[in-house]
Image (tube, rainbow, N blue to C red):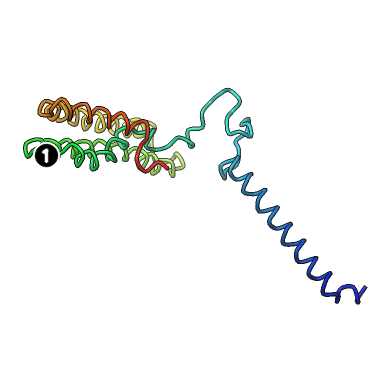
Amino acid sequence: MGKLDEDPTLKHSRRVMIGLAGVAVSTAMTSVHAQFGGRQRLRGESPMGGTGRGDQNPRAANPALADPIVAIERELPSLRTDLKLTTEQSALFDSFEREVRDAADAGRLRPRHLSALRTDDGSSVAATKVFNTIADDDAQRAEATRHALETLQALVATLTPEQQRQFDRRIIQSLREPLGSS
């Protein structure tokens, strides 16, 4: 058997076979990772990621699609350029952009707050604090969005019909095809 191990042809063949086996395993693992999204399935969840009840996997949702204000926020810088705004329109657009950013920032607070609450073992955070935090975050988001709407109405009143059509089209496009989602 010692002479066979020394044969260069057999050594080369073994190396090739081991290499091919490694590539096959790597390819299979990539396929498995892609199918399961790199996470363990939960009890009762099908291999395709659902629970078998037609539920959508909330983790798979694109954050921009989950938050339309963020999608709009990302669209505004290029929209500003494309609208070719006048000085008066630019001032209103600046205000609108700030209000949208404030609303998006208010929306970003909730996950941070909930993340901080999740680390508690239940001994120091009362249920009322959890609900107060959620309610406060929602109220801040609603108020910021309301301010953005008021500023938007003032801005739209100054736009030409062509600018309004482009503005409307791009806002809808930002929801359908959000920037930074690919």
* Nearer to me, 4 or 98: 4
**Which residue is situated farthest in the top direction here?**
53
Q: Which residue is drawn at 60% across and 35% down?
A: 42
Q: Quadrant of residue 107?
A: top left
Task: Specify whether 34 is left or right of 113.
Answer: right
**Horizontal and vertical percent for residue 6?**
85, 76
Number of dots carrying numbers: 1
Q: Which residue is drawn at 61% across and 33% down?
A: 48
**Which residue is situated farthest in the left direction here?**
88
Q: In which quarter of the image is residue 167?
A: top left
- The residue type indicated by label 1 comes to Ser
* Nearer to me, 112 or 162: 162
The local crowd at label 1, few if under 14, some if 14 to 19, many if 20 or more residues have their Cα within 10 Å, is some
**Which residue is situated farthest in the front direction here?**
162
**Horizontal and vertical percent for residue 30?**
62, 48
Task: Specify whether 176 is left or right of 167.
Answer: right
**Horizontal and vertical percent for residue 104?**
28, 38
Is the N terminus in the top left, top right, bottom left or bottom right quadrant? Answer: bottom right
- Is 63 situated above or below 18? above
Q: In which quarter of the image is residue 49?
A: top right
Circle 1: element type: helix
**Which residue is situated farthest in the right direction here?**
1
Is the C terminus in the top left, top right, bottom left or bottom right quadrant? Answer: top left
**Horizontal and vertical percent for residue 74?**
29, 41
- Is 126 situated above or below 28? above
* Nearer to me, 16 or 150: 16
Task: Specify whether 115 is left or right of 150.
Answer: right
Residue at which label 1 appears: 90
Q: Residue at x 67, y 48 (%)?
A: 28
